[in-house]
Structure formats: C-alpha cells, structure tokens
Image: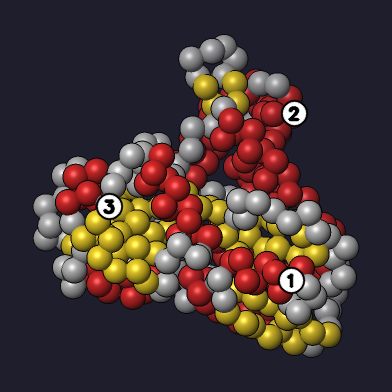
Amino acid sequence: MDLKQLRTLVTIHDQKSFAGAADAIGLTQSAISLHIKALENSTGMTLFDRTVKPPRLTDDGQILVKKARTILALCDDLNAASDHESLSGSLKVGAVPTTLTGVLPAALASLKVTQPHLKITVTSGFSGELASAVDKGRLDCAIVSEPQHPEPALNWKPFAFEPLMVIVPENSGFTNMREHLQNYPFIRFKRHAWAGRLIDDHLRELDIRVKVGMDIDSLESIAMMVAAGLGVSVVPKRHIAKPFPDKILARPFGEPPLHRVVGIVERRERPKKERVRALFVELARLCQTETDDIS
C-alpha cells in the first residue's frame, strides 16, 4: 500500500467512476485499475463490486476511503510545513508490544535525526490500558490496534494494515486452514489484547472451534512455540523485514484475508498535535515502504 493508491481510491469515490478519477489525476484507466488492484492485494480486501457497471465501492471500500482521507490529510499537512521546521519539547508515547519489536524503533531512530530537540519517552502495554492512559492525560498518544468501541474523547488515526495469518510448523503438511486450526493445539494471543479479541471474534464468525493449549501475550513467543512444533496460531503479520522465524508456514486467515489495523490514538483537543503528527507520518512512511518490500 502506498499514498498514491490511497489517493486514487479517494478520487474514484469523489469522481464517482474510474474514468472520472483517471481524468482528475491525469492517468489512464488501466493505471487507475492497477492502483486499486495493488491496494486490494496489500490490504486483503475487495474494495469494489465489479459485477455492476460502473464498479461500486464495497462496505470495506467505504471504510477504507474514510481512513485514507485521514492519512492523506495528515501527510498533506506535514508536507505543507517547512522542511526545516524543528520540533522541541516532550512526547510521552504508549505502544503495544507488537510495535516495540516492529516498526516503532525505526520510526524513533529517524525522528532522532530529523527532530533532535524532540524528547520521546515510550511506555509499553496493551491497547486498552494505553488508550485509558491517553484519555486520562498520562500519555500524549499511544500506538494501538483499532478500538472496537472508540472513546468519544479520543481521536484514532490508522497508519498500518496488517493481514492476519495462520501460522503452522513448516513440516505439518498444511492443506486446510480449518482442519489445522481445529485439530492442532491452538496457541492463543491473549484475549485482553485488542488484537487477541479480534482474532477470537473472527474464529467465532467462521465457526472454527480451537483447542487452546497456551495463552501467550507475545507474538515472538507464539511464533517460537509454533516453530518448535507445539501448535498453531493466528497472528498479525507485522511490517518488518522478517515477520516470522524459520520453520514456520504462514497463510492468510479468512477468505478474503482478514486484517487488523494499527494506528495512533490521542485526545481530541490534540494538545501536542504537531509532535504526534510527526510520529504518525514517520510510522506511515515506514509501513508504506516495508509493505511494498514484503511479499
């Protein structure tokens, strides 16, 4: 996924057709179609119903249009600022563990170079407790999974779409997702994490009944257990060069593939909006780059 693809999606929505978007952007209709196909491949979502003419946005497409507008607006705001603008002061950031060993270190390292006077401190925790800390003012912002029930006092902005993957030992002879999940010990991502609840909800929706053998709150630990042949699991595929260790097979979960969304939550009055925006844009940039590089 990249910003050009998101901008194409929003333009199709606004112009009411692929042809109108092509005229507005200055591309051919074939190029517009390729942008959307690439976006569907990277998100695992079907964005348009192509059985009707002209193609119509699906429910997933409508949701992604709204999220794309948020991402594009924030990126445009930052680009409009001076390249030499320097930020200073403090920023207290909360982060779920999956991002601490994922995209966050690279984002912080980049900001250390571009914003040397910005002091960022990081606290780890689960999405629910971090969102509560932001709401109470103990944190300025937090990197969390998409909330199922957003707090009215908080503003959440997505920057990464992570496909959910069934992971199994490479020598397990994977042939059928349902069969593996129901017949092998299931290593569950703890349910008090929002991502864990999301996975459990999807398992129920698909009527897949797992046999829980372990309950773990670390993606790295889950992956190592699976690699050792101790069970199977469903986890997000993070935006890092090597999301899973050797000796693991990873296959998309669901048809079409399901995903979790990661973003930044902050208070609606946005007391440190420029500092939060700088972190957000860096995270979005890194996820865009790594998404393009990861198969």
Q: Residues within 10 Å of mark 3 (few under 14, many from 20)?
A: many
Q: Residues within 10 Å of mark 1 (few under 14, many from 20)?
A: many
Q: Residue at x 74, y 28 (%)?
A: 14
Q: Nearer the viewer, residue 233 or 49?
A: 233
Mark 3 falls on what kind of element? Answer: loop
Q: Residue at x 49, y 45 (%)?
A: 43
Residue under pointer 3: 210
Q: Amino acid at mark 3?
A: Val
Above or below, comparing residue 250 to residue 86 in the picture: above
Residue under pointer 2: 14
Q: Nearer the viewer, residue 220 or 151?
A: 151
Q: Position of residue 79 (x, y in %)?
A: 79, 60
Mark 2 falls on what kind of element? Answer: helix
Q: CA–CA distance between discs 1 and 3?
A: 35 Å
Query: Contact, CB < 8 Å: mark 3 with mark 2?
Result: no
Q: Is residue 64 left or right of residue 253?
A: right
Q: Which mark is residue 134?
A: 1
- Number of on-image labels: 3
Residue 8, picture quadrant: top right
Q: Is residue 48 left or right of residue 140?
A: left
Q: Amino acid at mark 1?
A: Val
Q: CA–CA distance between discs 2 and 1?
A: 34 Å
